[in-house]
């Protein structure tokens, strides 16, 4: 498993202050012994004689004794929720499932390297236990689960299993990446985001140039829906192509609108996985 | 429509069992399939929907046309009955030896023409004047000869008439000739004008027993009877009474005429002593016989294989055009997706993750 080690790490920054007593890499909610200086409190509030701040105590006009507090460093759990419905079989410029797998591998590597847990849940219409991994800091286990993902057969229709996955994630807030092409009914998108509202959710929108910008201007094409919604013959011409691209843009915009109250804006993962682009997205939103 | 269908046939009908294969284009498409995550991404487009119907129809046409063409379709020949103006004319032509002579009673020499040749010339013009006339030709000398049965093929009738100036032979036996000429009319269609045209240059005695039979026949068929009597100069006329005893043997022409008159059918006798007289007699007959007549038209079997191949070619042409217009959606199946992720990263990010915190 030397391959995935080569890529850049995904840098992320949880939106909340995680609690808990384990030592990790992120700024925690609680004050603890070691770490970055956070604030000073009265000795009576934190009666810890080891951390009496002498300089601050002497400076206090009311002669109170002041104790330094430090931030705890706490780990978070990162979860990748991967849509394994039939539309993930799509192969345009890139293999869609391969793209999702590349993302998961990078996330697993980045998370386990800094002591965060990595969890994986694959779903189509139901939860798929074979592609599910409880959050673990064990790097080899995480990478093995991601490797299994590449062998997944995608033939389910719909992604209702994500609702079940959201129930499984109940509890403390987690960093959740929702990896899908989001070709779902609008109601399902809303329901899934509402169910995950507790967490810090980043939708990873799998796209492909062959689906919009890469369309030829002229020609006949027989299109076959991967989820079994039928076949259609399309006579491509510039006006239809424009309408098609506008429709796709509208869909992405609708997704952005729906997830705005619940999650970060969607990250468009098209053609090639670029960890630095995702890091920029995560640090700026 | 049903009549049209029933007239259709195929040379090898069992091949038509393969025709359901023509429904295949409903399930399969000629174009290469491009998988798409969601068909809902494609905007509605009536033009594309129309094209799909056209191409499916073209596929069905191509397959169906080929199978049909292999089966060898044809439209069966049939007879169509129509109504025109004309008459059924049964010609009874004397082929006795005396017809070879001229109207002057000699063997023809030089520019002279025999009675047979003159009647041939004039009767030939008579045939074909009106399209829907039907003719039968019977010749007789000692025995009657059926030359052409009742038909509207005028070419055949003219050919038969052309043959009547072959040298005749033997004697004149008009009774059996009449019997056969009458039988030419066949089962009657009501309202059809029928004419029996007897062309002879002499007569013979009719046996009284046969006379009774002929009477019965005439009463049944009821044709208009025309006797074109080619009279040799100097021979007795129809109306001439013989000088001696007035017996059929002495004046057969007169007694045949009397017999005809006694039949009770419309009867006219034309006594012609030359070619012009014959022609005028024929014209009179022509003018008299003007009635609607049903006639049958023969439509031959028609091979429809060419049409089937044509339809298949049209369908195939459309399919080929569609195939040529096919677009490649720019799919290059990327086998090694992780390689794409791996390659462009130059250096490993070795910095500790404290930056994230």
Image (tube, rainbow, N blue to C red):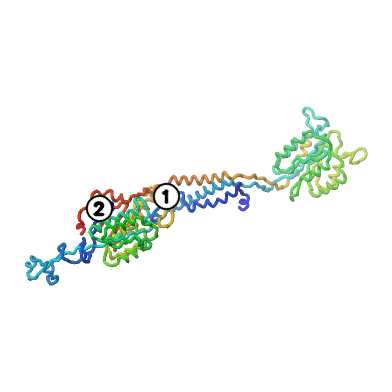
**Which image quarter: residue A36?**
bottom left
Q: CA gap, disc 2 to disc 1? A: 38 Å
- Nearest the viewer among B339 and B356 is B339
* B166 relative position to B75: left or right: right
Secondary element at image label 2: loop
Residues packed near mark 1 inside 10 Å, few (<14), some (14 to 19) or many (20 plus): many
The residue singled out by tag 1 in the image is: A221
Secondary element at image label 1: strand
In which chain is the residue bearing label 2?
A
In which chain is the residue bearing label 1?
A
As drawn, B228 above or below B7: above
Residue A232 visible within the image: yes
Residue A64 image offset from top left, x and y in percent: 9, 70
Residue A186 visible within the image: no
- Nearest the viewer among A111 and A213 is A111
**Which image quarter: residue A18?**
bottom left
Residue B17 image offset from top left, x and y in percent: 57, 51
* A214 relative position to B270: left or right: left
Mark 2 or mark 1, whichever is nearer to me:
2
Which residue is rendered at x = 48% and y = 53% of the image? Answer: B27
The residue singled out by tag 2 in the image is: A8
Residue B343 is tagged as: none
């Amino acid at each position: 498993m030397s391959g995935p080690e080569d890529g850049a790490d995904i840098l992320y920054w949880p939106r909340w202050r995680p609690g808990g007593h384990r030592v990790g890499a992120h700024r925690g909610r609680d004050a603890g012994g070691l770490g970055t200086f956070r604030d000073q409190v009265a000795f009576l509030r934190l009666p810890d004689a080891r951390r009496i701040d002498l300089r601050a105590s002497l400076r206090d006009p009311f002669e109170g004794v002041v104790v330094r507090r430090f931030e705890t460093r706490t780990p978070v759990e990162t979860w990748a929720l991967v849509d394994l419905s039939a539309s993930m079989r799509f192969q345009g410029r890139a293999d869609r499932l391969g793209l999702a797998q590349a993302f998961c591998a990078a996330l697993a590597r980045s998370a386990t390297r800094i002591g965060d847990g990595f969890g994986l849940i694959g779903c189509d219409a139901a939860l798929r236990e074979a592609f599910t991994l409880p959050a673990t800091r064990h790097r080899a286990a995480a990478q093995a689960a991601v490797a299994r993902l590449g062998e997944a057969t995608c033939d389910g229709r719909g992604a209702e299993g994500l609702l079940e996955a959201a129930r499984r994630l109940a509890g403390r807030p987690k960093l959740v990446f929702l990896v899908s092409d989001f070709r779902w009914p609008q109601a399902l998108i809303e329901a899934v985001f509402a169910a995950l509202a507790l967490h810090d959710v980043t939708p990873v929108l799998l796209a492909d140039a062959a689906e919009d910008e890469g369309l030829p201007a002229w020609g006949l094409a027989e299109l076959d829906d991967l989820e079994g919604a039928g076949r259609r013959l399309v006579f491509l011409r510039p006006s239809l192509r424009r309408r098609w691209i506008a429709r796709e843009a509208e869909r992405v915009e609708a997704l952005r609108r729906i997830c705005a109250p619940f999650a970060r804006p969607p990250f468009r993962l098209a053609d090639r996985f670029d960890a630095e682009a995702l890091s920029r997205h995560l640090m700026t939103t | 429509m049903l009549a049209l269908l029933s007239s259709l046939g195929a040379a090898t009908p069992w091949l038509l069992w393969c025709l359901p294969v023509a429904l295949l284009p409903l399930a399969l498409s000629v174009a290469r399939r491009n998988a798409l995550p969601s068909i809902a991404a494609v905007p509605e487009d009536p033009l594309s929907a129309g094209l799909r119907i056209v191409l499916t129809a073209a596929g069905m046409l191509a397959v169906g046309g080929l199978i049909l063409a292999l089966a060898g379709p044809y439209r069966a020949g049939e007879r169509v009955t129509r109504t025109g103006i004309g008459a059924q004319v049964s010609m009874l032509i004397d082929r006795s030896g005396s017809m070879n002579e001229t109207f002057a009673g000699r063997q023809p020499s030089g520019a002279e023409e025999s009675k047979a040749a003159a009647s041939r010339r004039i009767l030939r013009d008579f045939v074909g004047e009106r399209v829907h006339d039907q003719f039968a030709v019977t010749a007789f000398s000692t025995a009657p000869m059926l030359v052409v049965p009742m038909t509207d093929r005028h070419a055949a009738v003219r050919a038969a008439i052309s043959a009547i100036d072959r040298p005749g032979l033997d004697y004149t036996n008009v009774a059996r000739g009449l019997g056969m000429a009458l039988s030419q009319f066949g089962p009657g269609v009501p309202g059809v004008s029928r004419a029996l045209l007897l062309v002879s240059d002499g007569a013979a005695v009719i046996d009284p027993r046969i006379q009774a039979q002929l009477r019965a026949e005439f009463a049944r068929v009821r044709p208009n009877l025309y006797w074109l009597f080619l009279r040799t100069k100097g021979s007795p006329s129809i109306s001439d009474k013989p000088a001696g005893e007035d017996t059929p043997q002495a004046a057969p022409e007169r007694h045949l005429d009397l017999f005809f008159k006694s039949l009770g059918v419309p009867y006219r006798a034309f006594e012609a002593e030359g070619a012009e007289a014959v022609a005028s007699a024929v014209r009179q007959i022509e003018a008299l016989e003007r009635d609607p007549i049903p006639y049958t038209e023969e439509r031959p079997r028609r091979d429809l294989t060419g049409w089937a191949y044509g339809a298949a070619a049209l369908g195939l042409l459309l399919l080929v055009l569609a195939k040529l217009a096919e677009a490649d959606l720019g799919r290059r199946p990327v086998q090694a997706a992780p390689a794409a992720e791996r390659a462009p990263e130059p250096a490993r990010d070795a910095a500790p993750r404290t930056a994230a915190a």
